[in-house]
Image (tube, helix red, strand yellow):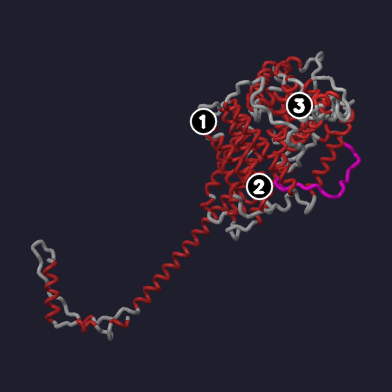
Amino acid sequence: MKLACLRCKRKKIKCDKGNPICHQCITASTTCQYVERRRRPRLTQQRETVPCLNYRLELLEKQIANSGTGEQRSPFSPLTVPSGPVNEDTSMITPSSRAFMNDNAQESWIYRMATDARRKFQSQTTPVSTPTPRIDDEMSSLNDALKDLGNLKIRPDLTATKINLDLSTGELRQCVDIFVDHMGTMVVPDIFATALDVNLIRMLPDIVDSPYVRVDPSAYVMYYNAVHYGLYQLRGPGDARTQEAYLSLLRAVPTWLDANTETDMDGYTAALTSWTAINNLDYQLSWKFHCKSCHFIKVRGIDDLDVAPARNFEEENAREATRYLYWHILSTDCLFRLFFGKPTVLSWSPNKVRPPAVFTHRNVHPSASQVMIAVVWVQYTLRTVKIINYLDSHGLEHCDTSVVQKVNDFCTQLEDLMAEWDMEARMKAESSSHALRCLIADHIMNIYAIIIGIKRLARPTDPAIVHPIILRAARKMVATLLYFEGIPALPDTTKFTFAHFISFYPFCAVFSLYEHILACTDPEDCEQDVQSLESIGDAMANICAVRLDFTPFAKTIMALNKVSRAIQDERRNQRTDVASTEIVDHLANTQQQFQNLANYIPTFDSPAFGVFSDFPMNMEGDMAPLDFVRALENDLIGKNWHENRWDMEGGMSGM
């Protein structure tokens, strides 16, 4: 059935749908424009297609990772789709069973980056020409740390693990209340706070186990997300109940994926669960949930949300909440592309989805901090998507000077954006709440992480010298982390945010600093970076005291720090040896010069000099200077010495 034209739809008048121009537009002498009806796929077709698409996507990722030399691809390497056909296996595996295979840490982006750093330590030419026993010992410790990290099981086998989340109803309600309050500090407060039914989430602790109430599967997953975040703050990340809440969440996911119905909560549940998996270091599973959220965006047509105008204010208000979800998933998609080595899933085109509005009917008078966070978030997300599209259109294999200049301008614009809103000063303002300061710091470090990721994505080769923009961004990220580490006592409401900081952002920056340390020839130029890395290692060790699953990651960073320190000390020793050798050579040259000078000094005949007569002393026993000079003069005159008497070797001119 053909839709009414845009003019009749906007004016809410009857349209005869005439072709090519309707009667109303002919009467008004205006342009008549029709919009094609979007065909919504049937739910049964979607359920049959999604498993096949997920399986094809995993096969493509494996072939991309194994193409070329057969080595694992660095997360900063540009992704290229293989030109040959993909060999597909006819055996189908359902998403629920494939999603919960026991991945290990070797598939994580951190393991790949740490392995790449070890390779550079081993192969790259450094001022330390011959490794010392100390460097060999530290490299051996690094190999052991990487082995432990590679053998780490990210999640246990859910079918063989007994999960007993035995909590009282009162404690469950407290966890949900903490989660509802925590939603206001997630990236942008309006992402989840304006879309989720808070009253429903608060009711779930009372009805979740009731056999008489049917709860949507996505609501179950959202509920266990809330319990996990609440226990994270109440009992800490390393508590057994906190881990059981996360496992309960994962156990509820297959039922949600296999459900026959799709609700508006599916997209928000998938987006939130993706970040929950990232906070639990489960990067492979977070990617699957991210794909689920992108699938929700495409099926609902949210990526074409603003192609046609809204019919009324109610529809526009509903679209506003959806825009926040779209831009949040778009920002997460950029993160997966830049650091996790994943392909771009969610595309953006101008005029299809507008940025979310700052002033809404729910918040007519936003605060200055809300305006700043919303504007900055939309600005750097939009610019990041544009530069990624630009790089993809120009190709990453051969980046010419124009592409490099475009990327440098992009990085400068992001730095100017932070300076324009004075974000660093607002982050350190003690008059602001800790939650607001952590939220601003989250955006600051996210911007610097994007700068590092884009610069690495666009560099044509693997240069030996780290670009100054990358180095400046990495140092800023580390300084921000150490600033929050130095705060004496963070409130409980911000402990979760800082734990997210120290378990994610350091890995975006430290590997650039390791490359800079390797490239330095003067140890004093990178001494401050080595000390900062050691401080980051100490902060990670403190997190390990309450979060045991983070221990292999922290040990890997501390092992890399020890290798860097060993190389740094060896450079100093070599410089000291060189300086000592130069001093010895200088003294030897000076002694030789004195010896050569002594050959030109004339030989005096000592018997030719008479003995000076005694000189009178004054009463105090001191020699009178005037009497001494006169006595010497009289003695010379008395012996009739002349000037030519001094020419004992035939003249001084021969010297």
Q: First in sequence: mark 2 or mark 1?
A: 2
What residue is rendered at 75% in x and 48% in y? Answer: 72
> Is residue 304 depicted above or below 123 in this figure?
above
Q: First in sequence: mark 3 or mark 2?
A: 3
Which residue in the protein does label 1 denote? 429
> Can residue 524 be seen from the camera position used here?
yes
Q: Marks 3 and 1: in contact by CB < 8 Å?
A: no
Verify whether residue 153 appears in magenta: no
Residue kind at label 3, given as amino acid type: Pro
Which residue in the protein does label 3 denote? 309
Residue kind at label 1, given as amino acid type: Ala
Residue 406 point in image, percent of width and height: 65, 47
- Image depth: mark 3 or mark 2 in front: 3
Magenta segment main secondary structure: loop
Q: Identify which residue, 159 or 422, lies in the foreground.
A: 422
Mark 3–mark 2 Cα distance, whole angstroms, equals: 34 Å
> Callout 2: 10 Å neighbours few (<14), some, many (20+)?
some
> Callout 3: 10 Å neighbours few (<14), some, many (20+)?
few
Q: Which residues are magenta?
A: 74-92
Per the image, label 3 sits on a secondary structure element best described as loop
What residue is rendered at 62% in x and 58% in y? Answer: 125
Q: First in sequence: mark 1 or mark 3?
A: 3
Mark 1–mark 3 Cα distance, whole angstroms, equals: 42 Å
Per the image, label 2 sits on a secondary structure element best described as helix
